[in-house]
Amino acid sequence: MAYVLAAVLGLAFGAGDQYLGTLIWLGDWPATAAQVSAPWLVLPFAVGMTQDRPRRAVALGLVATASALFGYYAMTYSPMEVHPWTFARFADGLVAVTTSGYNPAYIAVGLVTGPIFGFLGQQWRTRRWWVSAALVAGALSLEPLARWATGELPPPAPVWTTEVALGLVIASLFAVAMLASRRDDAISTDPS
């Protein structure tokens, strides 16, 4: 059941991300928000956080990310994207979009980072591992800086400000959770 839920969550996330980018009637921000990469790492992390066993978290991270990628690219050739639907047109379009431009690299990176962040989510759940927290909060907080350094920071700025703010809030929540966990561990090991 966990695999089905991860697949459905991934499909919805990927399709929703692609669809968000088409809402041009809302202004420039939806297209920019749809290009934010860090949520694609948060998805497998969140799925991994539901697991006690590392292998299962890794597998679920892969399932969620692969499903999200499929949902994203499938939405590109859906009737919601103004493409008349036939299976042949859908299949041809899906192959064309996944094999062109940078998309093969994005897919390969996603299929590697999905399992890694699934594992990191599991490690956060079971050990409150600070590396997990730092990588997730860092992905959110530092993505705009990395994009700016490479000349890939599209407007509008509020999208990136929101991402950094969200990263800082999440970092704060991770810090509070780690401190509470350490306090609870100290209380449970206190011999008195």
Image (cartoon, rainbow, N blue to C red):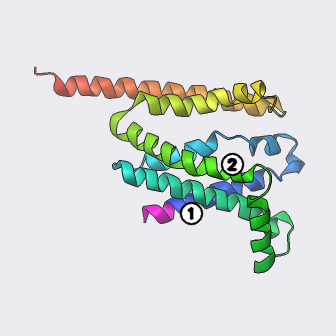
Element type at mark 2: helix
Instruction: Kindly identify the residue that appears in the image at 47 percent across and 55 percent down.
Output: 60
* Disc number placed over residue 106 in the picture, else none: 2
The image quarter containing residue 186 is top left
Instruction: Kindly identify the residue that appears in the image at 83 percent across and 34 percent down.
Output: 154
Distance in Å between CA atoms under marks 1 and 2: 21 Å
Instruction: Kindly identify the residue that appears in the image at 85 percent across and 75 percent down.
Output: 84
Tell me residue 28's x, y (percent): 86, 41
- Looking at the rendered image, the quarter that the N terminus falls into is bottom left
- Looking at the rendered image, the quarter that the C terminus falls into is top left
Q: In this view, does 89 lie above or below 135?
A: below
Q: Nearer the viewer, mark 1 or mark 2?
A: 2
Q: Can residue 17 be found in the magenta stretch?
A: no
Q: Say which of 59 and 81 sits in front.
A: 59
The image quarter containing residue 9 is bottom right
Magenta region: which residues? 1-5
Taking the image as drawn, is residue 152 in sight? yes
Contact (CB < 8 A) between labels 1 and 2?
Answer: no
**Residue on which disc 1 sits:** 8
Tell me residue 124's x, y (percent): 41, 37
The image quarter containing residue 138 is top right
**Number of residues whose C-alpha sits closer than 10 Å to that of mark 2, classed few (under 14), some (14–19) or many (20 or more):** few
In the image, taking residue 26 as reference, residue 150 lies left or right, namely: left
Tell me residue 11's x, y (percent): 62, 61
Q: What residue type is labelled 2?
A: Tyr
Q: Can residue 3 be found in the magenta stretch?
A: yes
Tell me residue 164's x, y (percent): 66, 27
Answer with mark 1 or mark 2, whichever residue precedes in sequence: 1
